[in-house]
Amino acid sequence: MAAAPAEEIRANAYVGFDTITQQIEHKLLKRGFQFNVIVVGQTGLGKSTLINTIFASHLIDSKGRLEPDEPVRQTTEIHPVSHVIVENGVRLRLNIVDTPGYGDQINNENCWDPIVKYIKDQHSAYLRKELTAQRDRHIQDTRIHCCLFFINPTGHSLRPIDIIVMKKLSEVVNVVPVIAKSDSLTLEEREAFKQRIRDELVYNNIRLYPFDTEENDEEEIQLNETIRSMIPFAVVGSERTVIVDGKPVRGRKNRWGVVNVEDERHCEFVQLRNFLTRSHLQDLIETTAQIHYEAFRSKQLLALKEQTNARPSAAAQ
C-alpha cells in the first residue's frame, strides 16, 4: 500500500535546516570533484588541442606521428592522464583518456574493442570496490563520464566505422560527437554536414547524450532539446593567442584572417564548453552512475546470481 503524501508545513520560527545546502557545499569543496573524459577519433583531428582549449590549460600532448621514422601504431592504445585543476576554490580532478591509433589502420575491424573494454573495466573496478566487505568511505571514481567522439570534417557523411563505434559506445558511455577542425568547411557546408549526421544517427537508432528523465523540469527539457538540435558541435581548437582588434584571443591565424575559437560566429566551441562544464557537468556524472553503471551492475549481479544458483544443482547431480 502506497504511503499517503506528507503534508507540507511551514515552521513557526526559524529552525536553520535551510543551511544544509551550504553544509553539503562545504563538504564537497573539501573533497573536490572528479570528471573523467575519453577522446576518440583518428590521429590528426586535434583531440589533444581541443581538450587543452576547453579547460584553458595544457593537459595532454599530441600523440600523432611527427617524424617519418616513427612507427605506425598497430592497435588502438589507451593513454590516461590525470590533473587537478583549481578554479575559484573548486578542485576538479580531471582524468583524460586518449586513444591514439584508433581508426588509423587499413583494416580497422574491432579497433573499438580496447576502448569499450577500458570503459567496462572501470565499471568493473568500481563494482568490486563497492561489493567489498570493508569498502572505502569514498570510492575513487574512474568511470568514464563523457566520450568526445571526433568526426572527420569531410562534408559528406559518417564513415561506416563511425556509425558502428558510436552505436557501441553509446551503450556504455555518454557520447558527445564533435566535428573536428570545422574551419575547413564553409558555414553552408557545415550546416548541411551536421544535418546529414543527425539524419544518420536517427536512421541507425543511435541515442546520444543528453537524455531526458522524469526529474527534468521544463527549462532543463528545453535546454536538452537545444543541445540535441546543435549536435554534432562544429568546433575549432587552439592554444595559441593571436591579437584581434588589439585584444588577445585564442584562435588560428591564416592568410585570410583569424578564426577566433570563442566567437560563436566562427564555430561552436563556446557552446560545447558551456555544455560540458557549465550546464551538464554534474548531469554527465549522475547519468554515468544512474544509467550506464547501473545497467552494467545489474547485468553483472544477475549473472553472479545465476552462477550461484547453478552450483547447488551441479553438486546434486
Image: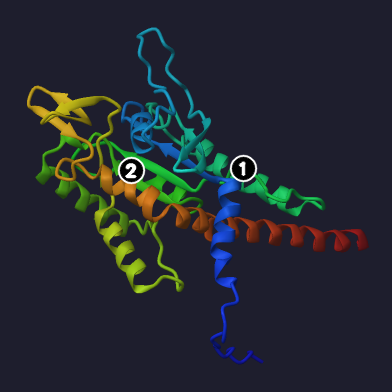
- Give the side of residue 63 with respect to residue 183, left or right: right
Whole-percent x, y for residue 156 in the image: 19, 42
Whole-percent x, y for residue 87 in the image: 44, 41
Q: Secondary structure at mark 2?
A: helix
Colouring convention used in this rendered image of the protein: rainbow
The answer to whether residue 189 is above or below residue 296 is above
Structural crowding at the residue carrying mark 1, measured as other residues with C-alpha within 10 Å and reported as few (<14), some (14–19) or many (≥20): some
Considering every residue shown, the one lying at the far top of the view is 69
Mark 1 vs 2, N-terminal side: 1
Whole-percent x, y for residue 189 in the image: 12, 43
Kindly identify which numbered label has been placed on residue 160.
Answer: 2
Residue shown at the point (75%, 54%) measured from the top left = 131
Give the quadrant of residue 298: bottom right
> Which amino acid type is shown beneath numbered disc 2?
Pro
Residue shown at the point (7%, 26%) measured from the top left = 256
Closer to the camera: disc 1 or disc 2?
1
Kindly identify which numbered label has been placed on residue 28.
Answer: none
Residue tagged 1: 121
> Which amino acid type is shown beneath numbered disc 1?
Asp
